[in-house]
Image: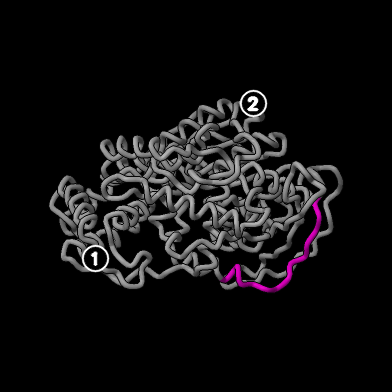
């Protein structure tokens, strides 16, 4: 999963992207390497706070790769050319998290955090995945209440019941079937990887390098599997378990261990003497207070005008906790909420992201999760899993094993999930924080094992989601930057303390 839903400012920027009306030049890309690249008439990207060097285009690709001569969709992509043409090596794709995120503007923001020697060597390539943003978009047009974070992630009722979750799954699935058009059935990780290869062909690149983050690590791993000889230098940052049977179900389940591994870091910070947002005297007291307040809000929610839902209940508090564990910089806001709840008050409601953006993100996310792999459909099975999770992992109250929209998805996956293997060139450097609420170390180790000799892994002794140039450390950043600039990796897996 990604931080996109919890960051209102980012949503606002995405809304601006969706609202752009300036045309992009469209080209049609042949199947990988069949012919020379099409002519791309790059145009100025529209938007705010973009690097003036960033330019945009689109490429036309099949909606259904099993019927390549059928309906077409467009993919929007962008680039900032390598800053030193004499040192240019190729194209570095910025693969976004999600599912339900894009990187069209990232060459102008996170791309500029890359060290000079990397920016000298690569064209920085951003893109909006199929169905999203300025690519051919989809929307399920679900009810506004179903856009709440505690609906998009399936929090059970306070007593552990999943009845309402199953009802929500059916309602949202029916909306996607009714309003999502043909494209909703063809949004998947494998198709995103195929789309990346069409962009590669349109750019005229024989191989590509990539920096994939969070869900983008799975996209990168699938691309490596489907197009192994098109890969140059791949960085997979904050890694997902590639289990081909469970796929995103395993990622959702990982929140229960992710919360348990990360909450102690928050609790230690929130109990530190001298901290102006100090919550309690010890880390153990912080945990007990949080669980007690969540249980109280289960019984007696506080009105929260302007929020969705318009109450601060136990699950809203738990979801806010998860969202704020992504980044230690967000600890103060979580502490302030806990202190307010203890007094029986609420802070101002968080700014709501623009609804068209939420609808778009929700549709792409749901389609990817449900089209990659079939989910169980038995309410009784989810009830059992939720009960076990609630007993073992009280912080997450059963949500990670609960029934999401895919429990009622009307269509079976069109193909099996891609199995990640150790067959292919050794082109991958993984970087992973030791404490990551969304993509815990355990899932990264599963991907590391699946890739075998194809990868080397850098484990960073840091806390938070997104390691490279974000919540990692200088040792990890230096190792990744050196790999992108020179192609040299550590001889074996390393730990950066």
Q: Pick whichever, 304 or 13, lies toward us.
A: 304
Boundaries of the magenta span: 16-29
Asked if 476 appears above or below 49 in the picture, the reply is above
Q: Residues within 10 Å of mark 1 (few under 14, many from 20)?
A: some
Q: Where does the image place residue 266, in percent across and percent down from the top left?
A: 27, 50
Q: Quadrant of residue 417?
A: top right
Which x, y percent locates residue 331?
30, 57
Q: Nearer the viewer, residue 124 or 171?
A: 171
312 falls in the magenta region = no
In the image, what residue occupies the spot 62% across and 38% down? Answer: 222
From the viewer's perspective, is 334 left or right of 343?
right
Rendered image: mark on residue 423: 2
Judge from the rendering whether residue 476 lies leftward or rightward of residue 20; answer left or right: left
Q: Which residue is rendered at x = 57% and y = 71% of the image?
A: 16
Mark found first going from the N terminus, 2 or 1: 1
Residue 481 seen in render: no
Distance between the Cα atoms at labels 2 and 1? 54 Å
Question: Based on the displayed image, in which of its 4 quarters is residue 301 positioned?
Answer: bottom left
**Residue 302 disc label:** 1
Residue shown at the point (36%, 36%) measured from the top left: 385
State which quadrant residue 128 falls in.
bottom right
Q: Quadrant of the C terminus?
A: top left
Q: Are marks 2 and 1 in contact (CB under 8 Å)?
A: no
Residue 21, percent from left and from top: 68, 73
Q: Which mark is residue 468?
A: none
Q: Nearer the viewer, residue 200 or 175?
A: 175
Left or right relative to 126: residue 98: left
């Amino acid at each position: 999963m990604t931080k996109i839903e919890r960051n209102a400012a980012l949503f606002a920027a995405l809304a601006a992207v969706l609202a752009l009306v300036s045309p992009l030049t469209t080209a049609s890309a042949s199947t990988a390497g069949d012919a020379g690249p099409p002519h791309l008439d790059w145009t100025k990207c529209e938007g705010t706070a973009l690097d003036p060097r960033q330019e945009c285009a689109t490429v036309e690709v099949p909606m259904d790769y099993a019927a390549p001569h059928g309906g077409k969709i467009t993919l929007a992509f962008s680039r900032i050319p390598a800053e030193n043409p004499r040192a240019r090596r190729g194209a570095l794709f910025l693969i976004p998290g999600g599912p339900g995120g894009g990187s069209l503007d990232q060459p102008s923001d996170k791309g500029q955090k890359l060290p000079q020697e990397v920016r000298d060597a690569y064209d920085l390539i951003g893109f909006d995945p199929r169905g999203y943003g300025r690519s051919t978009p989809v929307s399920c047009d679900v009810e506004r209440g179903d856009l709440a974070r505690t609906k998009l992630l399936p929090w059970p009722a306070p007593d552990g019941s999943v009845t309402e979750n199953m009802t929500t799954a059916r309602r949202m699935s029916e909306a996607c079937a009714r309003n999502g058009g043909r494209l909703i059935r063809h949004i998947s990780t494998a198709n995103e990887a195929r789309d990346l290869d069409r962009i590669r062909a349109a750019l005229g690149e024989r191989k590509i390098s990539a920096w994939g983050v969070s869900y983008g690590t799975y996209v990168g791993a699938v691309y490596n599997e489907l197009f192994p000889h098109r890969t140059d230098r791949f960085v997979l940052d904050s890694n997902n378990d590639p289990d081909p049977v469970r796929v995103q179900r395993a990622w959702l389940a990982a929140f229960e261990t992710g919360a348990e591994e990360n909450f102690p870091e928050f609790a230690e910070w929130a109990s530190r003497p001298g901290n102006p947002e100090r919550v309690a005297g010890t880390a153990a007291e912080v945990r007990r207070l949080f669980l007690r307040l969540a249980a109280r809000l289960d019984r007696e929610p506080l009105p929260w005008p302007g929020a969705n839902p318009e109450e601060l209940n136990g699950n809203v508090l738990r979801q806010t906790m998860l969202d704020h564990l992504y980044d230690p910089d967000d600890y103060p806001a979580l502490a302030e909420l806990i202190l307010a709840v203890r007094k029986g008050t609420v802070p101002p409601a968080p700014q709501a992201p623009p609804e068209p953006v939420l609808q778009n993100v929700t549709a792409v996310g749901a389609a990817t999760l449900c089209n990659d792999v079939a989910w169980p459909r038995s309410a009784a099975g989810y009830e059992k899993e939720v009960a076990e999770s609630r007993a073992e992992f009280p912080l997450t109250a059963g949500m990670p094993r609960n029934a999401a929209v895919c429990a009622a998805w009307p269509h079976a996956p069109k193909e099996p999930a891609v199995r990640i293997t150790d067959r292919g060139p050794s082109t991958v450097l993984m970087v992973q924080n030791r404490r990551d609420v969304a993509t815990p170390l355990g899932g990264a180790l599963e991907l590391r094992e699946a890739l075998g000799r194809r990868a080397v892994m850098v484990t960073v002794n840091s806390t938070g989601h997104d390691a490279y140039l974000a919540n990692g450390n200088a040792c990890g950043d230096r190792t990744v930057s050196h790999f992108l600039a020179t192609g040299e990796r550590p001889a074996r897996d390393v730990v950066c303390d």
